[in-house]
């Protein structure tokens, strides 16, 4: 999913550069004609043609194509389109930290602050909630961002293709501690995920 978003960004960037070059070139043409003393040719399109083609048709076609592509790579109902039963984790944002509840931990739900553990290669459905202000969950290497809104539950599905640690953050300004509202997603090899959760449960239950 993150790869699709990155590709979409590069396509938009390339398109913006191309449009800028074309617009600048068209803006220079009248000055070159005036410098040569050329009369306005009857073959030059009328203003209405430029308005309809460049001002309406071109942006309509371009923006519609980009919008459809964005819906394809970032579906609104993520979980319904994965084709695989996801791991489910509940994420709650507060000023200025994240709490993740792993519902499939041995012996019951396991709550961790700031760190979320997932199996690599499997979709993970994350429910997002907030107890105070609007926050935004974003792990750039895994997916786009999605808001956590007070009084509402949103969902986002992420998928880590390889084991490793993926950095994330709150992408919506939420107060003076916003810059420190960070998180980590630790992706384990599928065969190691259950054992990793069991170790975390044992650590949480160990006497302090």
Image (spheres, rainbow, N blue to C red):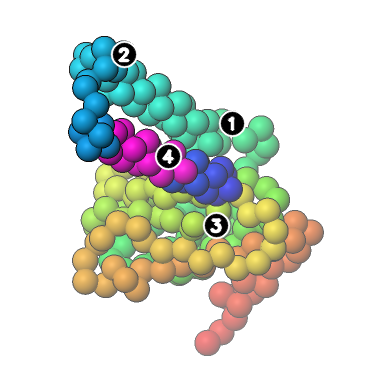
Badge nearest the viewer, 2 or 3: 2
Above or below, comparing residue 142 to residue 112 in the picture = above
- Write down the residue under mark 4: 18
Q: Which mark is residue 43?
A: 2
Of the image marks 4 and 3, the number of the one nearer the N terminus: 4
Secondary structure state at the residue bearing disc 3: loop
Distance from label 2 to label 3 (Cα)? Answer: 51 Å
Of the image marks 1 and 2, the number of the one nearer the N terminus: 2
- Write down the residue under mark 1: 81
**Residue 29 image point, x, y percent:** 29, 33
Distance from label 4 to label 3 (Cα)? Answer: 27 Å
Secondary structure state at the residue bearing disc 4: helix
Of the image marks 4 and 2, the number of the one nearer the N terminus: 4
Q: Which mark is residue 69?
A: none
- Quadrant assignment for the N terminus: top right
Asked if residue 71 can be seen in this view, the reply is: no
Predominant secondary structure, magenta span: helix
Identity of the residue drawn at 67% across and 72% down: 199
Secondary structure state at the residue bearing disc 1: helix
Other residues around mark 3 within 10 Å, as few (<14) / some (14–19) / many (≥20)? some
What segment carries the magenta color?
Answer: 14-31
């Amino acid at each position: 999913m993150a790869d699709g978003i990155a590709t979409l960004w590069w396509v938009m960037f390339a398109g913006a550069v191309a449009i800028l070059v074309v617009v600048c070139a068209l803006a220079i043409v009248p000055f070159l004609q005036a410098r040569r003393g050329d009369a306005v040719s009857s073959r030059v399109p009328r203003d209405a043609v430029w308005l309809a083609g460049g001002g309406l048709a071109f942006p309509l076609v371009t923006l519609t194509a980009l919008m459809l592509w964005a819906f394809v790579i970032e579906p609104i109902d993520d979980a319904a389109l994965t084709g695989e039963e996801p791991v489910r984790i509940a994420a709650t944002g507060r000023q200025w930290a994240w709490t993740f509840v792993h519902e499939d931990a041995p012996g019951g739900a396991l709550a961790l602050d700031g760190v979320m553990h997932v199996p690599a290669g499997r979709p993970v459905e994350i429910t997002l909630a907030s107890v105070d202000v609007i926050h935004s969950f974003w792990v750039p290497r895994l997916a786009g961002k999605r808001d956590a809104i007070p009084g509402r539950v949103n969902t986002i599905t992420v998928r880590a293709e390889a084991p490793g640690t993926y950095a994330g953050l709150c992408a919506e300004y939420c107060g003076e501690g916003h810059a420190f509202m960070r998180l980590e997603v630790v992706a384990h090899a599928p065969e190691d995920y259950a054992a990793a959760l069991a170790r975390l449960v044992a650590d949480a239950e160990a006497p302090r």
